[in-house]
Amino acid sequence: MKKFFLILFILTSYLPFSKVHAEGGIEVTPSFSELKLKPGESYAGSFLIKNNNEYNVLLDVSKGEITPDGKINLETNNNSSSNWITTVHANIRINSLNEFTFTYSIKIPDGITDQTIQPIFILKLVNDGTESGATTGISQLIPFQFRILVNQTGEYNADLDIVKLQASKSILIGSDQTIAFEVKNPSTSPAKPLIRLQVVSPDNQIIYQSVENENLSVLLTDQSILKENNISNAITTDLKPGRYNIELLVTDTLTSKSTIQKLSFYYIPLQIFIIIVILTIAFVILATLLLRFRKRKSFEKVTKKRNHIFMHK
């Protein structure tokens, strides 16, 4: 039964965060809560559940958590973060076209180290027995998710550092190019970096862009994000030769502080490079022949002058 319940939840976890609509007309607003709490701190919150159906519904309430590796854990134990959230609502009956305010409380235990926890409430829509219209199915399983950043000081003043920004080639001939970077949090406050890397052409066109850490995982003190991006697919034959700028923008979403670092490389298309090599070789050959010709002419002139002097003697 637990496996079936888990499959149902995974399938419904793709619903958008802002509002969740069940096929039967159940709406949860909002469906996601992000909090910043200290060990030992308590929080009380709520969300609204609307029954847009023209029949009464019954919702069974259960708890679970999203583990650090992204898996869904519906089994509670002493170490489960789902134990940190409580509610008085075991099941909820909502009349037709009515709404219900779901209340909950959170208590972070003392002594918890800096970390991110993701408990969830799961609302399962079932028929309450008073109407035959209540639908059943996968879409009737509705999650309410938390992302709670636990920090011992409660201060969020991280100042992220771009330790490295490096291109594998400063002069690129062909398309084999990689860009490596390292972003570090040297402060005592946790950070949630959002990293944007882009490459801009000489005519200010963005030819490559990537966003890293889109799930906004936490970067604790002295932790780093290291990445190497292969941009070879962005280097196409129709690109113009010239100077290409690399821009790395790092923003801490907890403090909105940003830092940017720039780098450049010069791009020469392979066809143009071959032409330059051929022209260079041709120039060297011509210059060598011209130099030999001049030396020969100079030698003949000197020889002729010596012969003329000798004849007059």
Image (spheres, rainbow, N blue to C red):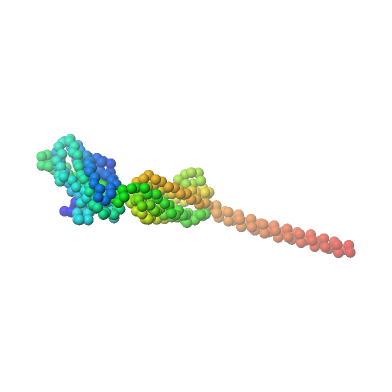
Residue 286, above or below 148: below
Q: Left or right: 309 with respect to 103?
A: right
The answer to whether residue 95 is visible is yes
Q: Which residue is located at x 49 percent, y 56 percent?
A: 169
Residue 224, above or below 50: below
- Dividing the picture into quadrants, the one containing residue 129 is top left
Depth check: 199 or 273 in front?
Answer: 199
Q: Which residue is located at x 50 percent, y 49 percent?
A: 244
Quarter holding the C terminus is: bottom right
Q: Position of residue 53 (x, y in %)?
A: 18, 37
Q: Position of residue 210 (x, y in %)?
A: 40, 49
The answer to whether residue 208 is visible is no
Residue at the outermost right position: 313
Depth check: 45 or 49 in front?
Answer: 45
Q: Position of residue 39 (x, y in %)?
A: 26, 51
Q: Which residue is located at x 15 percent, y 39 percent?
A: 94
Q: Left or right: 221 with respect to 124?
A: right
